[in-house]
Amino acid sequence: MKDWIETTNNYLMQQEKICRKNDSIDLRLYEEYGVNRGLRDEKGKGVLTGLTKISKIVSSKNINGKKLSCEGELWYRGYKVEELISSLGEDELGFEKIAYLLLMGEMPSAQEEQEFKDFIGKCRSLPTNFTRDVIMKAPSEDIMNSMTRSILTLASYDKNAKDIRVSNSLRQCIQLISEFPLLAVYGYNAYNHYEKNQSMFIHNPDPKLSTAENLLMMLRPDQKYTPVEAKVLDTALILHMEHGGGNNSTFTTRVVTSSGSDTYSTIAAAMSSLKGPKHGGANIKVMEMMENIRENVKDYSDQEEIMVYLSKILNKEAFDQTGLIYGMGHAVYSLSDPREKVLKSYVEQLANEKGREEDLMLYENVEKIAPQLIVQKRHIFKGVSPNVDFYSGFVYDMLGIPQELYTAIFAVARIVGWSAHRIEELICTDKIIRPAYMSVMEEK
């Protein structure tokens, strides 16, 4: 068996060399033919592929005829996200309210908000024996894969799974929004028990609790959480809920929707996109990087020592040798990521409550030093600032959420945005999204 595995690996390595030889494309051809790699130009501007009323990202403004970078803005249905969050009461949890706004396109009245919360509460359950027969039968460290398998299996329990009328799709989307916390937490609990040999516990959701409260309650053995913890997690969920139609997983949602596919397949495709470390998995890379920095920097207050080690990371001499400082920079934002600015204010509050001030000092110093180093060492056309992933993993860590769930928590929030874009795509167009690729194949 060992010899066969070694023979197979050697064979595949040889085949990889052949693929690399025949599939490599000269990067100069992209410039020659005016093709934007990743649908972004060298300044980070995206190629327009559609129209949307759901959200808006602002990173620059025209002033006196000149395009100038500005502080980042994120708008949900005509409202700045930070203003939506600040409009909530000090102890008010707003995930469901903002979810209604994104899905329906208007702010709910008090009655509409309560009816929506009640509907989500009633939908927050799984089919009989689903947890045992589906989630626990194949536990996996990859919770995103576990959730995706569960999403596709849920289609088997839906008699109208293939019905893509707007009303039915909306029903399916709201049900999935309600069920996602269960798929995430139960998927982790199964892995934690069967693969890590820890105690098994399954807490039923409480229909009267919010999404954030249910997540914390179901995840913890004692089911307890503080109001501050629930508020911070609720805020993080709102900030991750939506981010324009151009992000990878949302664009995937619209592409698959445009083909006429069903809701379950569409959301499963979005999940597969989100799990990538360049997208939803980025906060895990930040946490791994910060742990590596802790191991190699003695004094968290010594900015010079931190700068020296960050330089090693940029020079591919440390951490994962990719030359990347994770959590820094964004495809659109330059001066600032508005989500990061909002989240950081809660980070400080939570760090003080949890006694993590020293860790916060390290984060703040990296946040200060890294952008300057990146601009110095890289050919940058726009500014560099920390993105929301820089602090989100730290928040989850302080909340006691295991790293295996970080991307899954992102999905619990982002399914709202995916759902809104699916509904908009169904309503607005009957055209399949089919981009063009220019062939540079050599004829034989």
Image (cartoon, helix red, strand yellow):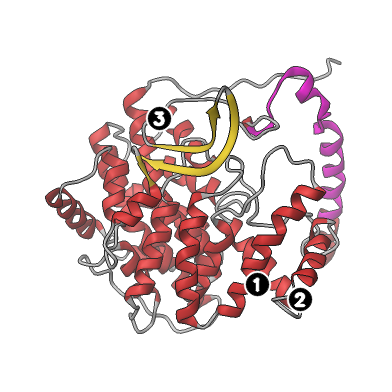
Relative to 112, is 294 on the left or the right?
A: right
Across and down, in percent, residue 228 comes to 36, 73
Q: Given the image, on which type of amino acid does mark 1 rest?
A: Leu
Relative to 415, is 314 on the left or the right?
A: right
Q: Given the image, on which type of amino acid does mark 2 rest?
A: Val
Q: Residues within 10 Å of mark 1 (few under 14, many from 20)?
A: many
Disc number lying in front (3 or 2): 2
Taking the magenta stretch, the answer to whether it contains residue 28 is yes
Q: Which residue is tagged 3?
A: 52
Foreground: 268 or 134?
268
Q: Which residue is tagged 2?
A: 297
Q: Magenta stretch mostly in which secondary structure?
A: helix
Foreground: 370 or 146?
370
Q: Residues within 10 Å of mark 3 (few under 14, many from 20)?
A: few
What residue do we see at 67% from left, 44% from top?
383
Q: Residue furthest top?
A: 443
Quadrant hosting residue 123: bottom left
Foreground: 8 or 193?
193
Across and down, in percent, residue 267 comes to 43, 44
Contact, CB < 8 Å: mark 1 with mark 2?
A: yes
Q: Given the image, on which type of amino acid does mark 3 rest?
A: Thr
Taking the magenta stretch, the answer to whether it contains residue 303 is no
Relative to 357, is 292 on the left or the right?
A: right
Across and down, in percent, residue 304 comes to 79, 69
Q: Which mark is residue 362?
A: 1
Report the magenta residues as a range: 9-38
Q: How far apart are labels 1 and 2 at the CA level? A: 10 Å
Classify 271 as above or below 256: below
Q: Which mark is residue 230?
A: none
* Res. 118 in view: yes
Quarter occupied by the N terminus: bottom right
What residue do we see at 42% from left, 80% from top?
200
